[in-house]
Amino acid sequence: LSEFSKAVDNRTYKMMRKAFPGPYTFILNASANVPKIFKAKKKTIGIRIPDNNIARTLVNELGSPLIASSVHDEDEIIEYTTDPELIHEKYEKLVDLVIDGGYGNNEASTIYDCTGLDPELIREGIGDINIF
């Protein structure tokens, strides 16, 4: 975390410890170590540690975090982001490997912006906001 984000306060750190792994995203101020292509104009990053054994095993085996952008699509239901076969069809020429971990879900994570003095709820998703 400290490699890719600026220092976080105690309150934010405790929230993240309680939320991870789980369906939460925390927006933090990015450090200079984050490639510029991922920072855009905002100079922030979203940190997510999903409760997904495949993702966590990849990170542990690689010894470093995965950096990715979010999927954006105009469709109301984005089936190709949850169906492993459709993911493979859409991205097979763009990526080296697609891991079939079964169907995902279309429920969004709960997002907190922690770039200011107090954490701000940006989006109430599948993560329970009452755990904090």
Image (cartoon, rainbow, N blue to C red):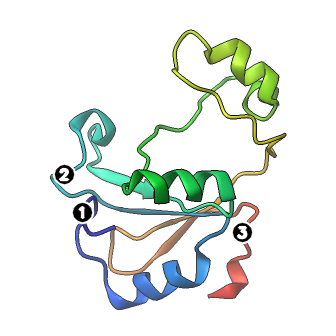
Judged left or right of residue 105, residue 120 is: left
Q: Position of residue 47 (x, y in %)?
A: 46, 60
* Residue to which mark 2 is pinned: 33
Residue 6 sits in quarter: bottom left
- Judge by depth and name the residue closer to the eye, 42 or 96: 96
- Judge by depth and name the residue closer to the eye, 4 or 55: 55
Badge 1 or badge 3: first in the primary sequence: 1
Q: Where does the N terminus fall, quadrant-wise?
A: bottom left
* Residue to which mark 1 is pinned: 3
Front: mark 3 or 2:
2
Q: Is residue 111 above or below residue 35?
A: below
Q: Is residue 99 above or below residue 10?
A: above
* Residue to which mark 3 is pinned: 127
Badge 3 or badge 2: first in the primary sequence: 2
- Label 3 sits on a secondary structure element that is loop
- Label 1 sits on a secondary structure element that is loop
Q: Position of residue 116 (x, y in %)?
A: 33, 72
